[in-house]
Image (cartoon, rainbow, N blue to C red):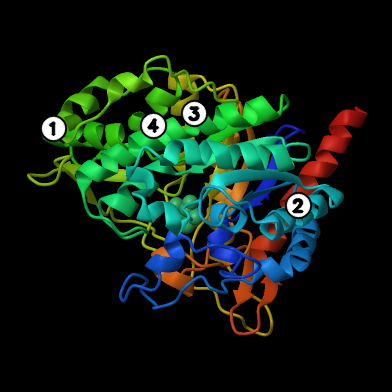
Amino acid sequence: MSELDRRFPASFLFGAATAAYQIEGAHDEDGKGPSIWDEFCRRPGAISTGETGDVACDHYHRWPEDVGLMRELGLDAYRLSISWPRVIPFGTGAVNERGLAFYERLIDELLRAGIRPFVTLYHWDLPQALQVRGGWASREVVPAFAAYADLIARRLGDRVKDWMTLNEPEVVAYAGHHSGVHAPGIRDFRTAILVSHHLLLAHRAAADAIRARSSEAHVGIALNLSPCDPATASEADAQAARRMDGSLNRWFLDPLFGRGYPQDMAALYLPYFVRARELEGYDGSLDFVGVNYYARRVVRASGEGPLLADRVDPPGEHTAIGWEVHPDSFRRLLVRVHQEYHPREMYVTENGAAYDDVVVNDRVDDPARVRFLERHFTAAAEAIAAGVPLRGYFIWTLMDNFEWAHGTSKRFGIVHTDYLTQRRRVKASGEWYRALIAAHRDSGVEAAAQ
Ligand code: FCB
């Protein structure tokens, strides 16, 4: 593996990520309340395969085996999310002790296995009871999220030090409230902008709540970021790419780093109403920024839509979900976030690829994923060499799981899930990762011994 292991500092964390709704199942067990995804999946046509996450990987029952798999892979860290309606079934008020106990057991087991838990509070499964009251479009969600964060920090903060408030607020806002391809399936641009604002306020309120409970907490957020490249050399395409960058990247990064909303975007969105002044004094004070990266965006000017910009699908290599493979954009992105925003620390909180994996003779050979990971880890190593304070990397994802609107049809795991039997098989990419982590550990030991 071309000495790839030696290109990461000894303290670097090699991890994998998952999200509650995508793996847990047990959608109505032990007092869990319904989430917007439980509701959304039941709408005809919402999920391409007609499936729900009712069972998913059945992780709620199989977590000991799954932690065993992580141990077998040698993971240093594991990024998981907590299902808000599992611990507060109606979003506010009564706490479900049985739901909390699940996460306490899981975290204790991770710690026993020597795996550092990185916990995301919100990976898209809003309690349905809050949606009925307006969901993220309602200001009420902000104190509700802070109270939830306070509960979790109070109950788990003695064992968990690394927190992410939100996963991909941009996707929550736009896939959930503009294109409507995610729960709650709303299609209204104005609502999407308002939601993005409430998400930023909720992040700040939750970060404050966690820090108030746990002085050792290390609080970040996981953002989906991508370089936006113009499709041609025309000035119109360059401007369109700049607007796409404003909407996808700067709209979240700028406020989180205390700069308020980007001026050009605030002007563009003015007709849609933004309470920009409320962000004054918002310094974000992030301990780290988490970057979820899958592909760059190639953009051309368009006469339609609020951004007057369209995505174009460039030629070249793509994964099974249709996303371009472009590792150099990953390096560029990491370097840019470091140079423009100077975060104290950075993590890759998600990166990975979907391929059409099949079991042959009890094995899953996924050379395309191995290649994808090799190239992206190399890009991350180049970013580190360029000075990026990257502290860890979480592969999306530990095991094949419920891929939102695609159901179980898209496999991103380094472990294969057989959904009929719930059998897990480590793929060749999982073996590759295990070897990388083991080599890194050995080279770290050598370095320490020198
Ligand atoms: C990200 C999500 C994650 C997974 C990957 C493929 O946008 O955060 O849950 O679906 O994409």
Whichever of callouts 1 and 2 sits on the residue coming sooner in the sequence is 2
Q: CA distance from mark 3 to mark 1?
A: 25 Å
Q: CA distance from mark 1 to mark 2?
A: 46 Å
Q: CA distance from mark 2 to mark 4?
A: 32 Å
> In the rendered view, does 319 fall on the left or right side of 106?
left
Viewer can see residue 291:
no
| In contact (CB < 8 Å): disc 3 and disc 2 | no
Mark 1 — residue? Answer: 271
Q: CA distance from mark 3 to mark 2?
A: 25 Å
Considering the image in quadrants, where does the C terminus appear?
A: top right
The disc labelled 3 sits on which kind of residue? Arg
At x 37%, y 16%, the residue is: 280
User: Mark 3 against mark 4, which lies toward the viewer?
Assistant: 3
Give the answer, above or below, for where 354 lies relative to 135: below
At x 44%, y 36%, the residue is: 142
| In contact (CB < 8 Å): disc 3 and disc 1 | no
Give the answer, above or below, for where 75 lies relative to 245: below
Viewer can see residue 32:
yes
Query: Which numbered disc covers residue 223?
Result: none
Query: Which numbered disc covers residue 104?
Result: 2
